Each structure stands twice: as C-alpha cells, then as structure tokens.
Image (cartoon, rainbow, N blue to C red):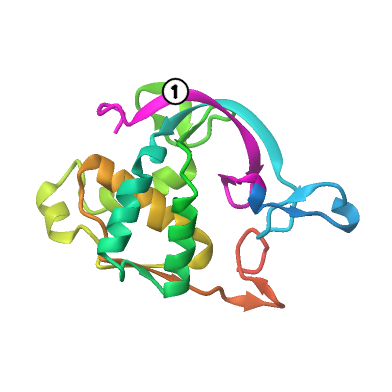
Amino acid sequence: LYDKGEIYKGGYEGPYCVGCEEYKLPGDLIDGEGEFDGQKLCPIHKKPVELLKEENYFFKLSEYGPKLLEFYAANPGFIQPESARNEVVNFVEQGLQDLSISRSTFDWGVPVPWDDKHVIYVWVDALLNYATAVGYGANQEKFDGTFPANVHLIGKDILRFHSVIWPAMLMAQGLPLPGKVVANGWLMVGGEKMSKSNLTG
C-alpha cells in the first residue's frame, strides 16, 4: 500500500483509549462522573482517554467512503445483522477520516518496513494477519486456495475495523473482500462486557 501511494506521513492529535488501543472520535466519548468528573471517558472501558499528539503514517481511508457505500448497496448481506449494517452505512455516510497506521511515541511492536522510527498500529497489523497467515506474500497457492474468508464472525465493538477499514485496505490492494461480516453480541459478566482489559475474560 505504501508503494502504491496509499500511505503518507502526517501529524495527528486526538483522544486515545489504551484499553481499546485506538484513537476515539470526540463524539464517541462519554462524560465522567465521580472520580472521573470533568474528564472524557471511553464508552467501553469507562476510563479516561489520553490526548496524544504524534507523527504517524496514514492510510488514505477518506478516499474509500464512496467505494464502500457502493459496495454495501450492491451487497446488502455483506454486514449482518441489519442493525449493524445500518450503523456502518450511517458512519461511512458522515465521511471518513484518513487512518493512522503507525505509532512513533513507543517502540514495542512491528517496525514499519520503510521507517524504523515507527511501529505498525496494532489494528492494522491484526487485520493484515488475515491475509499473511494464509500465505499472502509468501505462498500464493495457499493464499489463492484460502482467501478471502466466507464469514468474519466478530464482536460488535470491532465492527468498524472489519466492515470499513479492512474492506478499504483490501480494495486499495486489489484483493477480494470477505463474503460477509457478522457482528455478534458480547458475553456479559456482572452487566459488563467480558474482556481481558476489564479483567473479566
């Protein structure tokens, strides 16, 4: 993607949730109460976000909004259930921002191949594993016989990664998209989502 000009270097400042390992949009945050009064919280972890500013590499996600909407319209069963599809379509219709794909404020992680002062942002690395784990770039025969997945069964909190970012990355690389993305509910413990970051998984 970098060689194709789909990735560029720029600066970014925004609220970041350590538990989610992602930047949040200001409109996604909730107001804190009690010990967090006056602070903005991650709606999932109910903990304050950090305001981070750094130099990053960006994927030109903003250019893929119209292509994604066209794909969703031509493939109405791509995102399921319908409530998840509606959420994604509404999100993309509001306009996409370019996606930060690297971090330069720490050095743990997979180094960016063309710039060792940056590491790949965790979600981009994770999504790429869907292709590299089945031979992309190493075993074309295995890759062609395996990829793409018929179904991505995911938790509803990672819906945008799998139905917006991942399809856009595949489109940019000229690769086929999964058959469908099915967003599942959460496993709940004591009324809260089960997760390792909440120490309930």
In magenta segment, residue 90: no
| Total numbered labels placed on residues in the image | 1
**Foreground of the two, 64 or 52:** 64
Query: Residue 40: percent from the left, percent from the top?
Result: 76, 48
Farthest residue, direction right: 34
Instruction: Indicate left or right for 196 with 176 as reference.
Output: right
Instruction: Indicate left or right for 55 with 197 as reference.
Output: left
Q: What residue type is labelled 1?
A: Lys
**Foreground of the two, 108 or 7:** 7
Instruction: Indicate left or right for 160 with 24 as reference.
Output: left
Q: Which residue is drawn at 56% across and 46% down?
A: 22
Q: Residue at x 36, y 29 (%)?
A: 7
Residue range corresponding to the magenta coloring: 1-26
The reply to whether residue 127 is in sight is no
The reply to whether residue 7 is in sight is yes
The image shows residue 164, relative to residue 55, as above or below, that is below
The image shows residue 152, relative to residue 115, as above or below, that is below
On the image, numbered disc 1 is attached to which residue?
9
Q: Which residue is drawn at 61% across and 70% down?
A: 194
